[in-house]
Image (spheres, rainbow, N blue to C red):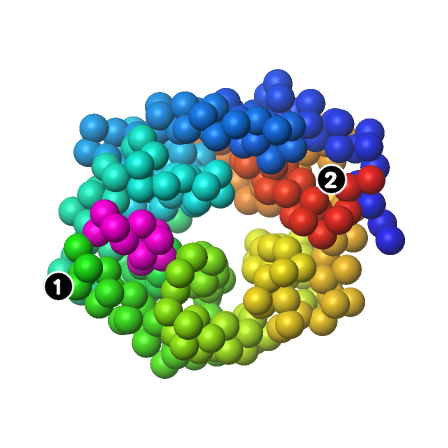
Amino acid sequence: MKMLERDQFERAANYLRHEARPLERALFAHAFEGGGRTAVLAALVPYQNDDGGFGRALEPDMRAAASSVLATTIALDILRRVGATEETSGLPAALVYLIDNYDAETGRWPIISPAVEDAPHAPWWAYAESAANFRDFWANPRASVVGYLWQYRKLVPSPFVEGALRLAATDLLTYSQMMEMHDLMCYVDLLATPGLPGEMRENMIDKLRRVVVRSVVMDPAEWNDYNLKPLTVVRSPQSELAAAVDPAVLNANLAYLLDTQEADGTWGPNWAWDFIDADAWAVAEREWRGVLTLRNLETLQAFGRLA
């Protein structure tokens, strides 16, 4: 079984310790070196705005200081990963921001705000095209948002969060089994929410397994492209969605991950927007290397592939 050898791990660790953002440094220490949650929370503080939302290039391809629902869900994912509770500093304000930005007319959340245009950003984050690009926010970011509101529902009005969860779950069951990759990932986030009602959760698992078969790219020849790979959905052997992917395909994707580590120990993005702003992209690309390298180390650890 192919493994990430110790010297390869140390090269990745060296990048995370010295070149990555303080946030990824703290997350690496938390995941691999016994670091506490406090350092992660402190590293998140600079990304939170007075309105409770998060921004300030927490998502590296979007450099505006202003808050967005997208960046706020990224922050909440980090808080979930480190075991944050309703009492965790910054979390209640983030939930208030999400509630305040709910569009009652559509029953959804806009993924970004017009302020995205105030700073360099990737072309796919253009505000004018956001509703069309993200299918009127049907799942992205709605499914993720609903999951975080449900997890921390002690701080959210009950009728609101119960109705939002029921609607998101019902919409999933009526959706095509061929799902856009980011929509699917938002439902994977929702499925990871602790305390989902039992029958609802089982129905979601059943539907998402069928969606994974149709929507995840299983052919290794296509994995160099920007698409949804098995390990992006099946994050550990314990994933409820693992049954939807042939074990041989998962092993091949793990081998692919090991083979694509670069000489400096990192994994970089397979997208770019230097043609928009070369200087801003250079900063974003370095930040993405930290994000992706940490993510891949965590995946390899979950599958027992660290020597």
| Foreground residue among 104 and 65 | 104
Return the residue at label 2.
261
Instruction: Please identify the residue farthest to the left as the structure is shown.
Output: 105
Q: Secondary structure at mark 1?
A: loop
Measuring from the top left, give residue 268's x and y in whole percent: 62, 38
Give the SS element for disc 2: loop
Dividing the image into 4 quarters, which one contains the C terminus? top right
Q: Residue at x 48, y 30 (%)?
A: 37
Q: Residue at x 44, y 44 (%)?
A: 80
Give the label on residue 105, or none.
1
- Whole-number angstrom distance, CA of label 2 to CA of label 1: 46 Å
Principal SS element in the magenta part? helix
- In terms of image quadrants, where is residue 270? top right
Q: Earlier in the sequence, mark 2 or mark 1?
A: 1
Query: Would you call the spot at circle 1 few (<14 residues within 10 Å), some (14-19), or many (20 or more)?
Result: few
35 sits left or right of 254 in the view? left
The relative height of residue 114 versus residue 170 in the rendered view (above or below) is: above
Left or right: residue 255 versus residue 69 is right
Magenta-colored span: 146-156
In percent of width and height, residue 2 lies at 85, 49
> Looking at numbered disc 1 in the image, what kind of residue is underneath it?
Glu
User: Taking the image as drawn, is residue 234 in sight?
Assistant: yes
